[in-house]
Image (tube, rainbow, N blue to C red):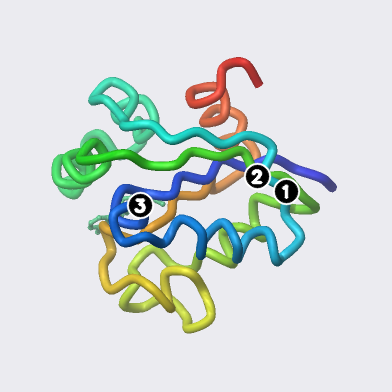
Amino acid sequence: MVERTLVLIKPDAVSRGLVGEIVSRLERKGLTFEAMVMRTMDEQLADEHYAEHLEKAFYPPLKAFMISGPLVAAIVSGDQAVSVVRGLVGATDGRAAAAGTIRGDLSLSNRENLVHASDSAESAEREIKLWFPEH
Ligand code: CMP
């Protein structure tokens, strides 16, 4: 079934010059970029986007990182896009993520892990509304 998912190419990926690499990996898989914008998160958007993590110990440094510079937000679509993108992105901790995944190949951190991808179809619709209200 064709699905949409929200992808954030995080500030570490932008500052490291990895936007093209990440977009390319998703495109080469056959996924489609439906919308894309470069934007710097503010505190309110960070708190809304990461609502489920607000009370977690890792949230304050995660928020500081996510608002530290511009990121690229995108709507990506394709057959089973939510799980397909999560598979290409890899496990949260770049040090443990499998080789061949974006994080496994390019990240050594569980915070600065290059990409966010929605974890379910419901999260995807909630996150797309936040980032792309016109969609
Ligand atoms: P993301 O997919 O954006 O979802 C939540 C983010 O929190 C995750 O990627 C990481 O950037 C960060 N994160 C999750 N767990 C930890 C952790 N234990 N320590 C630091 N950052 C974390």
Looking at marks 3 and 2 on the same chain, the residue that comes earlier in the sequence is marked by 3
Residue 32 circle label: 1
Would you call the spot at circle 3 few (<14 residues within 10 Å), some (14-19), or many (20 or more)?
some
Percent position of residue 112, x then y: 27, 58
The answer to whether 25 appears left or right of 110 in the picture is right
- Asked if the residue under mark 2 is in contact with the one under mark 3, i.e. CB atoms within 8 Å, the reply is no
Q: Does the closest atom of ligand 1 sit within 8 Å of the Cβ of label 1?
A: no
Alpha-carbon span between mark 1 and mark 3: 20 Å
Residue 14 circle label: 3
- Asked if the residue under mark 1 is in contact with the one under mark 2, i.e. CB atoms within 8 Å, the reply is yes
Examine the image and state in which quarter residue 72 appears.
Answer: top left
The residue drawn where x is 34% and y is 24% is 45
The residue drawn where x is 28% and y is 73% is 108
Secondary structure found at label 2? strand
Give the quarter of the figure containing the C terminus: top right
The kind of residue tagged 2 is: Val
Q: Is residue 125 above or below residue 61?
A: above
Percent position of residue 60, x then y: 15, 40
Alpha-carbon span between mark 3 and mark 2: 18 Å
Label 1 or label 3, whichever lies nearer to me, is 3
Alpha-carbon span between mark 2 and mark 1: 6 Å
Instruction: Report the front residue among 102 and 62.
Output: 102
The kind of residue tagged 3 is: Val
Q: Which residue is mark 2?
A: 76
